[in-house]
Image (tube, helix red, strand yellow):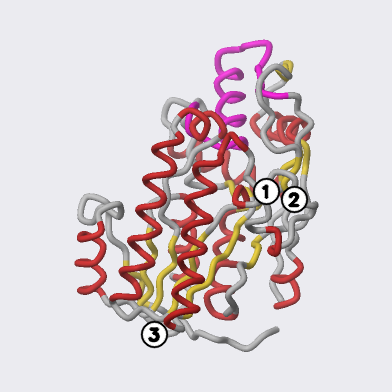
Amino acid sequence: MESKVFDTSGKRIWVAGHRGMVGAAVVRRLATAGCEILTVGREEVDLTRQADVERWLDKARPDAIVMAAARVGGIHANSTLPADFLFINLMIGANVVNAAHRAGVKRLVNLGSSCMYPVGAPQPIAEKSVGDGRPEPTNEAYAVAKLATASLAASYRQQFADDYVTAIPTNLYGPGDNFDPLMSHVAPALMRRMIEARESRSSRVEIWGSGTPRRELMFVDDAADAILFVLERYSAAEPINIGIGVDVSIRELAELIARVVGYKGELAFDAGKPDGAPRRLLDNSRLATLGWQARTPLADGLDAMYRWYRKHKVDVAA
């Protein structure tokens, strides 16, 4: 295992986006790392407003930042709200990275997204494929904003020697996920639909697409552990993938979720609806070589997400 390039012990670390699924998981993980965790809500600091971010960072002066803040959504939200996803994420990324440099923050982990990779990238996707082609059309606006932020972080490293890195997580799921029917990603969207179908005794659940695309799904608490590992041990201009190295088809995922929630009806795939990218599996060899690997099997992670949903959604029967 590589030696530490940044010791979190006793440091002040700002988790930007601490209320989101990923940010909350990072906060949970950092709580065991012997550091001081800094957070601030959007009611106090609007990350799309440059003056807000600069004012807060000038005052807070963290030693490091984990940049988990973003406007996120699934295939429907990305394809119908491209201006929102591009503008909001461009502003958040530019403001946080620039204000971090301005405040003298020397260590930052920027979280990218696997949708940054071109749609035709060789599988599994290695970090060198970033920027080699256009992203998948249904989430291109979000991907462009993430690409720009990654480029900005690398540029501050090049010009000012700021130790800013970009980590690219695969598809994440788990406690705190977004279950909104129009804004959620595939795992929570399928889970909510099947829970509602079970409760209403519906005999079938309709699912967008053919069911053949393959996705790599990583439990969010594993991702948070990997993010801390990257914060402490990775320093390079090139991004680093955070993944598990295994994928499943959407059909296999749907069948597994049905078993987890106890739905026994028909899963009806609508091949007339968009599939998105046919496959998106990250090459996690760089992270594995450094000495990190995921621990949570997909079935266990989905069960944890289901238990979280039942606890936090009073309209779902026990």
Residue at 46 percent across and 65 percent down: it is 152
Q: Nearer the viewer, residue 273 or 141?
A: 141
Q: Secondary structure at mark 3?
A: loop
Q: How far is disc 3 from disc 1 in space, using C-alphas?
A: 40 Å
Q: How far is disc 2 from disc 3 in space, using C-alphas?
A: 41 Å
Residue 200 vertical position relative to residue 226 in the rendered view, above or below: above
Q: How far is disc 2 from disc 1 in space, using C-alphas?
A: 5 Å
**CB-based contact (under 8 Å), mark 2 and mark 3:** no
Crowd tier of the residue under label 3, counting other residues whose Cα lies within 10 Å: few below 14, some 14–19, many 20 or above: few
Q: Which residue is mark 3?
A: 10
Q: Is residue 17 left or right of residue 237?
A: left
Numbered range of the magenta stretch: 181-209
Image x and y of residue 23, in percent: 44, 57
Q: Amino acid at mark 2?
A: Ala
Q: Nearer the viewer, residue 127 or 155?
A: 155
Q: Image quarter for residue 312?
A: top left
Q: Of the residues tagged 2 and 3, which is closer to the observer?
A: 2
Q: Which residue is mark 1?
A: 118
Q: Which residue is mark 2?
A: 121
